[in-house]
Image (tube, rainbow, N blue to C red):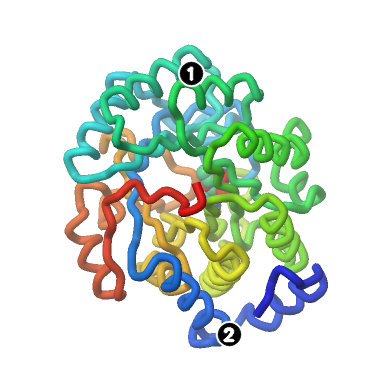
Amino acid sequence: MNLDAMSKAELTALISENAGNSRNSEIFEYARKIRYKHYGDKVYLRGLIEFTNYCKNDCYYCGIRRSNDKIRRYRLSADEILLSCGTGYGLGFRTFVLQGGEDGYYTDDKMAEIIGRIKEKYPDCALTLSLGERSRESYQRFRDAGADRYLLRHETANSEHYSQLHPPTQTLKSRMECLYTLKELGFQVGAGFMVGSPYQTNESLAEDLLFLKDLQPHMVGIGPFIPHHQTPFARMERGPLHLTLLMVALVRILLPKALIPATTALGTIHPQGREMGLKSGANVIMPNLSPVAVRQDYALYDNKISTGKEAAECLDALEKSVSSAGFRLDFSRGDHPDN
Ligand code: 5AD
């Protein structure tokens, strides 16, 4: 199965034909085989610190969008972030992901200071940032300060679809430029998209694959769209489980060495969602390391899980369910092999 050589029409047909198939299909088998070839049964861990839920953007799907005045907003101080890293380090994590809304409070200076402090204290750890679109100069400063990786989902590679998910101030062009810039600056880069977001078609999913083929990101985050009741998409349907797993499998086949998380959103729509993600080709899990007091406030979508086996402090439970799915937690940094 050579996805690399397929046209948009062929990829669209492939997605349509398999959108409803059982997980025993050839595609899932093949994705598992490729994953084993490069990663065996390893599942890399990332400690996720959601450090601010302030956001200047107004994405129609997201619960922490600017216009949502019903949520409690919070910001973690540098000391609080360091404390979370300390907890994570003690638990064995060797990658920290700082994720937040696009919050101007965290100026380049502030971010550089936080990054510097984390890298100084934990030089053996990888640091991933996920704080949205910034200028090349900002990204360069983060890189110089020691950040290793950057996650920025493209959300959809179809510009018309992008404009149905975001207000006109946000454009796909700008998102894509950021991703290529991050790559140029030497970050390990993560792109990604939601599955089943409003107005998505199988053709736009095919475009996501073509975009990923061009970008060649090191990481790809894929999760189902889940409505949040305080957004314009409150009444939209959530993304289907099987289609999400299919896209995970196809991305594994397209980018054999990619680091692909079994996302929290997958775990939210099905109790075994993350294990199913692993069996479909995913090889990363990002347990929540945010202070428990703010976890409920980082609600991108409704019913987001945060205190069960997806919580960093419940690694034992995670270990159990991951091993019963046939995989093994790996506590190394888990860099992309080509980096
Ligand atoms: N459902 C699923 N995923 C969402 N995200 C934001 N809002 C939602 C939602 N309602 C995802 C986006 C973003 C990532 C941090 O979370 O893809 O990039």
Tell me which residue sits at (77%, 66%) in the image.
203
- Residue 270, given in percent of the width and then of the height, sits at 41, 68
Tell me which residue sits at (54%, 87%) in the image.
25
Pick the front one: 317 or 177: 177
User: Do we see residue 297 in this rendering?
Assistant: no
Q: Which residue is mark 2?
A: 21
Is 177 rendered above or below residue 36? above
Tell me which residue sits at (68%, 76%) in the image.
2
Q: Which residue is mark 1?
A: 106
Q: Amino acid at mark 2?
A: Asn
What quarter of the picture does the N terminus occupy?
A: bottom right
Determine the image quadrant of residue 246.
bottom right
Numbered badge on residue 4: none
The residue lying furthest to the front in this view is: 338
Instruction: Measure the C-alpha gap from mark 2 to mark 1.
Output: 45 Å
Pick the front one: 34 or 150: 34
**Neighbour tally class for label 1: few under 14, some 14-19, many 20 plus, Cα within 10 Å:** some
User: Do we see residue 143 in this rendering?
Assistant: yes
Q: Amino acid at mark 1?
A: Tyr
- Residue 65, given in percent of the width and then of the height, sits at 57, 35
In the picture, measured across the screen, residue 158 lies left or right of residue 261, that is right
Circle 1 sits in a helix, a strand or a loop, which is it?
Answer: loop
In the picture, measured across the screen, residue 250 lies left or right of residue 208, that is left
Ligand 1 within 8 Å of disc 1? The answer is: no
